[in-house]
Image (spheres, rainbow, N blue to C red):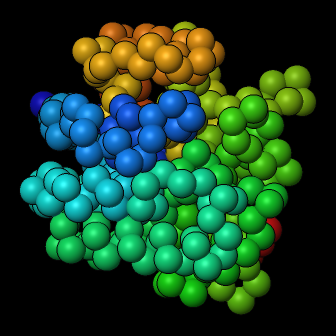
């Protein structure tokens, strides 16, 4: 199949960052009040079947991406981690068990990073240089988080959602890649937002992509690529392509609506999006963004 990355219609546009946040259906922030971490190992594990479906989708489209993986998952699925790497994708860290950064504190965050990285690297047989905070939880409350990432030698983070949202967000953060620490090479690459009537809107994937009409995401990524001349950053989760996953009946109605809406159409929308724009790994995007130099000052 002809790779969309080399199609003439894409030739003048930036290569966007394609990313998967590798966590299972029971590890999401929406259910953290009703599913205890201690019960995780007793629940139906669907991560391997869903990630294999994503790997097939990416292979069919001829694209490479980044898999931000929980250490908890990597420890239990080393063969999957090796398959991801063998197929040319980047393996990166999503922390150990999806605990938000602002709940950990600096010492807890450092320990979480180290534990997750050791598990992922051991499972995958590849170095981890990128990080994404669970629920985009690096925000105005955690100015120390970037220092911890830099101390541990990370090349980039994609942990900021520069919007106001009830679940996460750092509204004042820059919309595009920036260097959060003076004198450090660390780059933060925020998830994509679009502008309309002077307001920022989340447009980087996940629930925004799954629930809203496809045309919204197409408009947003075109705005970023063509008007701003910058790459977009898109993410989704393996459970989002899995309409047969177990249902959590005792979760709040709002959480259930967010989690289960449009699971059956997600794979088709992904195929359309991947075919319509240029995509690549987050570590490669970070290198290109770093070349902007002084423009990346926070």
In the rendered picture of this protein, how many numbered marks are placed on residues? Answer: 0
Question: Which residue occupies the extreme right position in the image?
Answer: 198
Question: Which residue is pictured at 45% across the width and 34% down the height?
Answer: 35
Where residue 60 sits, quadrant-wise, is: top left
Does residue 60 sit above or below 229 in this rendering?
above
Where residue 186 appears, as percent x and y from the top left, is 60, 76
Viewport quadrant of the N terminus: top left
Horizontal side of 76 relative to 228 (left or right) equals left
Where residue 53 appears, as percent x and y from the top left, is 18, 31
Does residue 155 sit above or below 184 in this rendering?
above
Question: Which residue is pictured at 17% across the width and 54% down the height?
Answer: 77
Question: Which residue is pictured at 78% across the width and 49% down the height?
Answer: 170
Question: Which residue is pictured at 17% across the width and 40% down the height?
Answer: 48
Q: Decide which of 92, 15 is in the foreground and name it.
A: 92
Does residue 146 sit above or below 205 in this rendering?
below
Where residue 193 appears, as percent x and y from the top left, is 68, 37
Q: Decide which of 121, 75 is in the foreground and name it.
A: 75
Query: In this rendering, does residue 237 appear at all?
Result: no
Where residue 158 sits, quadrant-wise, is: bottom right
Does residue 278 sit above or below 80 in this rendering?
above
Where residue 132 appears, as percent x and y from the top left, is 51, 57
Query: In this rendering, does residue 199 appear at all?
Result: yes
Viewport quadrant of the C terminus: bottom right
Horizontal side of 47 relative to 154 (left or right) equals left
Q: Decide which of 54, 33 is in the foreground and name it.
A: 33
């Amino acid at each position: 199949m002809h790779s969309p990355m080399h199609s003439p219609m894409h030739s003048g546009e930036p290569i966007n960052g394609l990313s998967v946040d590798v966590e299972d259906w029971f590890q999401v922030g929406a259910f953290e009040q009703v599913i205890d971490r201690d019960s995780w190992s007793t629940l139906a594990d669907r991560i391997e079947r869903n990630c294999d479906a994503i790997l097939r989708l990416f292979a069919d489209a001829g694209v490479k991406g980044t898999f931000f993986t929980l250490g908890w998952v990597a420890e239990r699925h080393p063969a999957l981690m090796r398959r991801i790497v063998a197929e040319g994708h980047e393996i990166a860290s999503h922390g150990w068990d999806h605990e938000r950064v602002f709940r950990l504190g600096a010492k807890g965050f450092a320990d979480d990073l180290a534990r997750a990285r050791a598990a992922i690297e051991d499972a995958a047989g590849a170095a981890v240089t990128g990080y994404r905070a669970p629920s985009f939880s690096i925000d105005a409350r955690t100015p120390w988080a970037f220092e911890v990432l830099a101390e541990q030698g990370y090349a980039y983070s994609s942990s900021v959602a520069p919007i106001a949202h009830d679940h996460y967000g750092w509204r004042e953060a820059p919309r595009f890649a920036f260097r959060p620490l003076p004198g450090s090479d660390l780059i933060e690459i925020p998830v994509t937002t679009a502008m309309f009537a002077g307001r920022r809107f989340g447009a980087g994937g996940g629930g925004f992509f799954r629930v809203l009409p496809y045309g919204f995401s197409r408009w947003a990524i075109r705005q970023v690529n063509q008007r701003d001349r910058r790459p977009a950053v898109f993410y989704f989760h393996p459970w989002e392509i899995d309409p047969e996953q177990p249902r959590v009946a005792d979760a709040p109605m709002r959480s259930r609506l967010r989690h289960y809406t449009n699971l059956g159409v997600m794979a088709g929308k992904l195929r359309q999006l991947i075919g319509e724009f240029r995509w690549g790994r987050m570590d490669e995007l970070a290198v290109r963004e770093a070349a902007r130099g002084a423009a990346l000052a926070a």
